[in-house]
Image (spheres, rainbow, N blue to C red):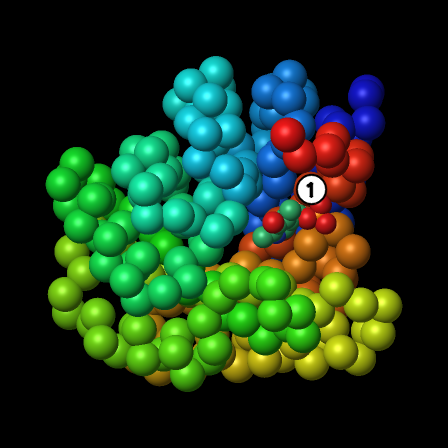
Amino acid sequence: MSRISDRITELTAALPKGVRLVAVSKFHPVESVKEAYNVGQRRFGESRADELAAKAAAMPADVEWHFIGHLQTNKVRKVVAVASVIESIDSERLLRLVDSEARRIDKHIDVLLQVHVAAEESKTGMTPDELLAAARSTAGNLTHARIAGVMGMATNTDDSNRIRADFRAIAQTAARLRDLIPAATEISMGMSGDRQIAVDEGSTMVRIGSDIFGPRPAKV
Ligand SMILES: *Cc1c(COP(=O)(O)O)cnc(C)c1O
């Protein structure tokens, strides 16, 4: 077996029940996605609208595409058309836009609200309070976007205490969101380098790229 299929098989076996694997295929060729698909992987993560659309067109229809990158307003249409889940809702405005585009094409779509807890300013997402305010003020007026939980990233650091604290803050935000929306049970957290800590802290969905596909080719 080649490395990609081995890694999918190993990771799937290693994850506890209730933790799903999103294989982050961004910047990797569609041949790599097919290799993962052929050993049963169906959930893939992409961070750019054009790349997502091209891969979705090249892959079977039963792939569940997760959009995990910063979503610009002018790309909402393209992403809503093919994604099953948009994990990176980083403002109330974007949430409303996704809902109205989904309504326009009469498609129900799951969304995760992205929370920012990491040290880096460059990372996107709402503060926990902004996130809860967005959920509160849209409650009852979303018709096609379903808030399914939260997504977040830990600080990029070797300090495992800081990483753990970040994941706890994400999980706490998820718990506060569940008080408003009981069905919002998903906690998408954990990447190649910090997956185990995320699982310990209650992740329901890990997003793994380089551990499956190897180092990413340079962005083009
Ligand atoms: C790229 C990316 C990942 C995957 O990162 P790896 O370190 O390669 O596992 C996960 N989540 C988001 C939001 C990403 O942009």
What is the x, y in percent for residue 151?
51, 62
Q: Is residue 155 left or right of residue 34?
A: right
User: Which residue is at the front of the view, 24 or 15?
Assistant: 24
Front residue of 115/72: it is: 72
Q: Is residue 16 visible?
A: no
In the structure shown, which secondary structural element does the residue marked by tag 1 occupy? loop
User: For this view, does 98 lie left or right of residue 85?
Assistant: left
Provide residue 185's location: percent of width, then percent of height.
Answer: 43, 66
* 165 vs 126: above or below: below
Dot 1 alpha-carbon crowd within 10 angstroms: few under 14, some 14 to 19, many 20 or more: many
Would you name the residue on which mark 1 appears? 209
Number of on-image labels: 1
- Three-letter code for the amino acid on which mark 1 is drawn: Gly
Q: Residue at image x 23%, y 59%?
A: 96
Q: Position of residue 26 (x, y in %)?
A: 61, 35
Q: Residue, x 78% and y 56% (percent of image)?
A: 193
Where is residue 179? Give x, y as percent: 35, 82
User: Does 98 sit above or below residue 128?
Assistant: above
Residue at the outermost right position: 158
Q: What residue is at 30 percent from the left and 66 percent from the top?
A: 92
| Disc 1 CB within 8 Å of nearest ligand 1 atom | yes
Query: Who's the residue at 40% across and 23% down the image?
Result: 61
Front-most of residues 157 and 21: 157
Residue 81 position (above or below residue 76): above
Is there any visible trace of residue 218 in the rendered image?
yes
Q: Quadrant of the N terminus?
A: top right
